[in-house]
Amino acid sequence: MQKSVPELEGMLRGDYKSLARIISMVENEHPLAAEILLSLNPDYKIPVIGITGPPGAGKSTLVNVLLEQLSKSEKKVAVLAIDPSSPFNKGSLLGDRIRMSKQFNDPHIYIRSIASRGALGGLSEKTSEITDVLRSAPFDIILIETVGVGQSEIDIMGLADQTVVVLVPESGDEIQHAKSGLMEIANVFVVNKADREGADLFASRLSSMLKEKKVDVPVFKTIADRSFGVEKLLDYLFTRANTGNPLRIEQLMEKAWRLIQRKRMKNIDKTSLRERIEGQSRLQGFNLYRFVDDYY
Amino acid sequence: MQKSVPELEGMLRGDYKSLARIISMVENEHPLAAEILLSLNPDYKIPVIGITGPPGAGKSTLVNVLLEQLSKSEKKVAVLAIDPSSPFNKGSLLGDRIRMSKQFNDPHIYIRSIASRGALGGLSEKTSEITDVLRSAPFDIILIETVGVGQSEIDIMGLADQTVVVLVPESGDEIQHAKSGLMEIANVFVVNKADREGADLFASRLSSMLKEKKVDVPVFKTIADRSFGVEKLLDYLFTRANTGNPLRIEQLMEKAWRLIQRKRMKNIDKTSLRERIEGQSRLQGFNLYRFVDDYY
């Protein structure tokens, strides 16, 4: 099967150009995309680390320092940076930052930025598919960075083996706000910019909150722009990765469900659905439940 | 068919107890829920008005004043108040407020509070089903109030004929923030608490922004707690309702899609899906795409 997509062989040899082409084919729904996905052999032992948090927390700096450390210890690392884009307003904030990164030409590091065009503004199914591509290429660790706004925060939990939530000492309100959901998605908290006032207090309050909830979520303090605390964080992530991902089956279930859904809805012609609805909905007493029951 | 659900007749006669029971049956997935939905005759001429906006904008006060005015002019009105509840943290903020409302015993007014247990924190499918129930009971107007946090804001657009976004003079930042999406979902803006400083300036800046975007979205100024400006708003909503909802077909399409999906996924046994995944995913080279292809 691999014969028809020669880039797959290149990808397995560690060639980034081949990998990039494979990802583009998946991202752009190339006719061979389905074949590519069917022929992958994703390695679930490679840790996939989600990195999220509110804007301004220093995620990008932290990721850059993580990359530096990983490269130093000869680890091959892939970064998938999710560009925020609302269903209305397509933006591209991360792409430029990445091209400026000094790690961009490091052979240990593969960086890719993709747009999140997901339903409801969350991460798209493509993000999950591209993660499977990365799990099939030879990497030691995969980082997925999202700007922590809205739905993508929650979606990352369905994708990553561990989710790191990056905060700053001033994030007190943020974390307590019911809507944030940050408390629930974090496997690891990082209080970045820990040289700022109030950092120790915030970190220890956060730790006690977590202890009260009886969850095993550590709080690390880092000063990313001085590389402080990053090594310890990495050690933890790799150690933790050895015990496996307790959410794995749940994540696979969710994804299988979506794949089955897609397969079963494939033969529905949207044009004829629209035409039928346009016709029928003009009639007195139109009921969509009966309509679906009658036609589908 | 209606025979087996006697409350449907009561509902059509305008009996609120019957209506409440019907809604509860739909909300709680009673065995007769499907039959109820199939036997509805929703009236698409009844305007369904979504009311949303950031916390603290005075939505509840505005809704109370709208109710007062509508009741005075002998209009029958239903209010569906969506209680915010994250997938993690089930809250009930609106319920108590409603029970305290002086309109609670007004025979022109039916108020119902439901929890939003939607996928991804948005409005659940139940909200849409209950709206269809309300469209089938004799009402002149239906108000759906959501607290404007996250996904429910965007979902309301898929449900309502017109969406009113309530802001305060201090909402300037809120509206410009890319993540809010408020600009895109509003059919009508209300600048409430318009006696506060900066109200006129904010309202006129908002108007010019909308004019630049060439969208036909009016900006109303209200002082809800003094009933100021509310009558004009209501006039607009009823006038606009006569021209129909340009999103109707799109909304029906989306909903039909979800209904067809549900129907086609009905026979999938989650337990056996889980067992299969648990077994297979332990094997070397497990690929979920192949798995779904083979089994479903």
Image (cartoon, coloured by chain):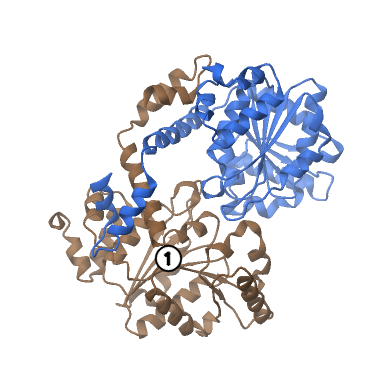
Chain colours: A blue, B brown
From the top left corner, tell me how far across and down residue A61 is, in percent.
79, 40
A57 lies left or right of B286 = right
A92 over B73 or under it: above or below: above
The image quadrant that residue A212 belongs to is top right
The image quadrant that residue B55 belongs to is bottom right
Quadrant of the snapshot with the N terminus of chain B = bottom left
From the top left corner, tell me how far across and down residue A143 is, in percent.
68, 32
Element type at mark 1? loop
A192 over A229 or under it: above or below: below
Instruction: Return the residue found at the far left.
Output: B3
For the point 53% across and 38% down, the residue is A125
Quadrant of the snapshot with the C terminus of chain B = top left
From the top left corner, tell me how far across and down residue B258 is, in percent.
38, 47
Residue in front for this viewpoint, A129 or B268: A129
Q: Is residue A247 visible?
A: no
For the point 53% across and 67% down, the residue is B186
Disc 1 packing (10 Å; few <14; some 14–19; many ≥20):
few
Residue that badge 1 annotates: B246
Q: Amino acid at mark 1?
A: Pro
B41 lies left or right of A278 = left
Q: What chain does mark 1 sit on?
A: B
A166 lies left or right of B246 = right
Residue in front for this viewpoint, B239 or B221: B239
> How many callouts does the rendering have?
1
Residue in front for this viewpoint, A241 or A93: A93
For the point 38% across and 81% down, the residue is B70
B289 over B262 or under it: above or below: above
